[in-house]
């Protein structure tokens, strides 16, 4: 994906929906309808800051049936490299941004007999779009939404107004917790479970589903990782024949892009596997941060996801 | 006309117990009973508690005597067995593993029902035992001819001579049959019994 394939958008509304989450509405700068998408899709938002460009994935939370605008929810991440802070501090009504076309790495199973959606915090966003597809349909569904406290429950008005009985809400502050065993031990055959939220929640759902005998094909999850900050290192690109320096607060992918070498990507969050790159030489260790490679592939040291993974090394040569 | 090397031809493997499942539903027809006995014995060793959630539906001659499993139901024929299977699926929970043992035509029909309940490959195991006779769907008149043992068969619906291909439809639980003498009417390759 390169810049030519992005869409220029203008921010038409900004709303602070919780102390940490801002809700942005975007329309095509050129006017007209935005590309169609399905519930669970995300876009990459390109943010041109003064010092650097950020490209972050955000789930579309607006209705797939209304393409005059896209809506995203952005949680402020204090410990991050600045993308969400840029969205919170520098983006206002009228701001121009570029976005990549929507990609769905978290779709609903089309022939499921029941959907169980489990959201934690900002993880609610992909489900808001999916609910638009489920609403009024013949397939039963339920949403279990866990948040810190009432003031942290984003988009609740919209959820309860439309979804009423399908929504089960849990406040950590009131000591309420999802009964994972109860939920996953009694679902009818043909049910699919979807989870989006903090790593702990996702692990809990995957683990509990496994305990109750759920096969992998019925368990879906999405968690975009922000590229973590790490030690600086150098990488040699074998085909481009150049050395690229990766600064502590830049990802490997960003650094390669800044050097003018294009790497195909879709999610920039360690999920999709699109940017998988062959490691030709390594003296040191790879620091895998993706959710795509198997443990065996990670241990093998022959391949890396430059969007979120790094290296602590003397030498790293990539097949780029 | 390509008749072999087609990827849709189902591949079966000897049944083995899947201890990652919480509930086990087993269907056996004909010689399939013996395969299921083997799985039950495996479960008994690997995960004894699983026997209490194991249900067996059987239309087989052999004696399947087993204590410890949750239920064993016997049927005279495939049809009532498949009906009971549908009912069983309606009441089944996520975490169920399906084991099917019998002739391919039976496996195909059981799979057709399992698909309706959105069971995926990682929830189903099937072992082919018994006749290789095929259900053949005429691509011209859409009639399914049962119990086909020959490479070429006359369609039960339109009387065309059909070449039985390896092209298999999971939705229809049948192999595709294509008119074999369309270009030269009456000129048939030798008819041989190959699906025994």
Image (cartoon, coloured by chain):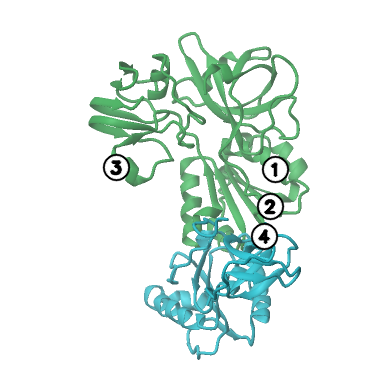
Chain colours: A green, B cyan
Q: Quadrant of residue A262?
A: top left
Comparing B59 with A249, the one in front is B59
Chain under callout 1: A
From this view, report whether residue A234 is shown above or below residue A186: above
Question: Are the numbered discs 4 and 3 placed on the same chain, yes or no?
Answer: no
Instruction: Kindly identify which numbered label has been placed on residue A141.
Output: 2
Question: Are the numbered discs 4 and 2 placed on the same chain, yes or no?
Answer: no
Mark 1 and mark 2: Cα distance apart in space: 9 Å
Tell me, yes or no, whether the two marked residues, 4 and 3, touch with CB atoms within 8 Å: no
Can residue B131 be seen here? The reply is yes
Image location of residue A105, percent across then percent down: 56, 39
Residue highlighted by disc 1: A131
Between disc 3 and disc 1, whose residue precedes?
Answer: 1
Mark 3 and mark 1: Cα distance apart in space: 39 Å
Q: Find numbered disc 2 in the image and state the secondary structure of the residue it sits on.
A: strand
Q: Find numbered disc 4 in the image and state the secondary structure of the residue it sits on.
A: loop
Tell me, yes or no, whether the two marked residues, 1 and 2, touch with CB atoms within 8 Å: yes
Rendered residue at 28%/26% (across/down): A317
Residue highlighted by disc 3: A299
Mark 2 closeness class: few <14, some 14–19, many ≥20 residues within 10 Å:
some
Chain under callout 2: A
Between disc 1 and disc 2, whose residue precedes?
Answer: 1
Image location of residue A274, percent across then percent down: 47, 33
> Which numbered mark, 4 or 3, is in the foreground of this view?
4
Mark 4 and mark 2: Cα distance apart in space: 56 Å
Residue highlighted by disc 4: B184
Question: Are the numbered discs 3 and 1 placed on the same chain, yes or no?
Answer: yes
In the image: residue A217, left or right of residue A150: left
Between disc 2 and disc 3, whose residue precedes?
Answer: 2
């Amino acid at each position: 994906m390169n810049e030519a394939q992005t869409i220029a958008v203008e921010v038409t509304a900004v709303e602070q929906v919780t102390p940490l989450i801002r809700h942005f509405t975007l329309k095509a700068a050129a006017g007209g309808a935005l590309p169609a998408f399905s519930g669970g899709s995300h876009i990459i938002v390109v943010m041109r800051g003064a010092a650097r460009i950020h490209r972050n994935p955000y789930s579309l939370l607006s209705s797939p049936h209304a393409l005059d605008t896209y809506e995203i929810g952005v949680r402020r991440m204090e410990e991050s490299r600045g993308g969400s802070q840029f969205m919170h501090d520098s983006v206002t009504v009228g701001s121009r941004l570029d976005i990549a076309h929507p990609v769905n790495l978290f779709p609903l199973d089309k022939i499921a007999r029941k959907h169980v959606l489990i959201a934690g915090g900002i993880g609610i966003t992909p489900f808001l779009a999916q609910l638009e597809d489920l609403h009024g349909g013949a397939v039963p569904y339920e949403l279990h939404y866990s948040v810190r406290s009432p003031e942290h429950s984003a988009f609740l008005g919209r959820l309860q107004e439309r979804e009423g009985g399908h929504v089960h809400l849990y406040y950590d502050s009131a000591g309420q917790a999802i009964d994972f065993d109860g939920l996953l031990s009694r679902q009818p055959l043909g049910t699919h479970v979807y989870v989006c939220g903090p790593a702990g929640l996702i692990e809990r759902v995957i683990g509990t589903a496994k305990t109750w005998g759920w096969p992998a094909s019925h368990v879906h999850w999405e968690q975009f990782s922000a590229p973590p900050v790490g030690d600086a290192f150098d990488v040699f690109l074998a085909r481009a024949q150049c050395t690229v320096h990766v600064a502590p607060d830049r990802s490997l992918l960003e650094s390669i892009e800044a050097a003018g070498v294009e790497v195909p990507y879709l999610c920039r969050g360690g999920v999709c596997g699109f940017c998988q790159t062959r490691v030709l030489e390594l003296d040191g260790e790879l620091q895998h941060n993706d959710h795509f490679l198997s443990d065996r592939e990670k241990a093998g040291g022959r391949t890396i996801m430059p969007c979120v993974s790094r290296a602590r090394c003397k030498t790293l040569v990539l097949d780029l | 006309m390509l008749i072999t090397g087609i990827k849709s031809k189902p591949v079966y493997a000897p049944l083995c117990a899947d201890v990652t499942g919480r509930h086990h539903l087993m269907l056996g027809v004909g010689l399939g009973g013996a395969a299921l006995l083997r799985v039950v014995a495996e479960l008994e060793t690997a995960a004894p508690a699983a026997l209490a959630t194991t249900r067996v539906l059987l239309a087989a001659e052999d004696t399947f005597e087993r204590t410890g499993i949750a239920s064993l139901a016997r049927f005279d024929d495939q049809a009532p067995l498949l009906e009971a299977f549908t009912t069983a699926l309606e009441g089944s929970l996520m975490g169920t593993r399906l084991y099917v043992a019998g002739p391919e035509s039976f496996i195909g029909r059981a799979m057709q029902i399992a698909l309706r309940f959105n069971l995926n490959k990682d929830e189903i195991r099937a072992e082919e035992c018994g006749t290789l006779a095929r259900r053949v769907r005429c691509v011209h008149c859409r009639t399914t001819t049962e119990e086909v043992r020959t490479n070429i068969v006359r369609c039960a619906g339109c009387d065309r001579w059909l070449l039985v291909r390896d092209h298999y439809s999971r939705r229809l639980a049948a192999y595709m049959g294509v008119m074999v003498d369309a270009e030269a009417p009456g000129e048939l390759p030798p008819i041989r019994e190959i699906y025994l």
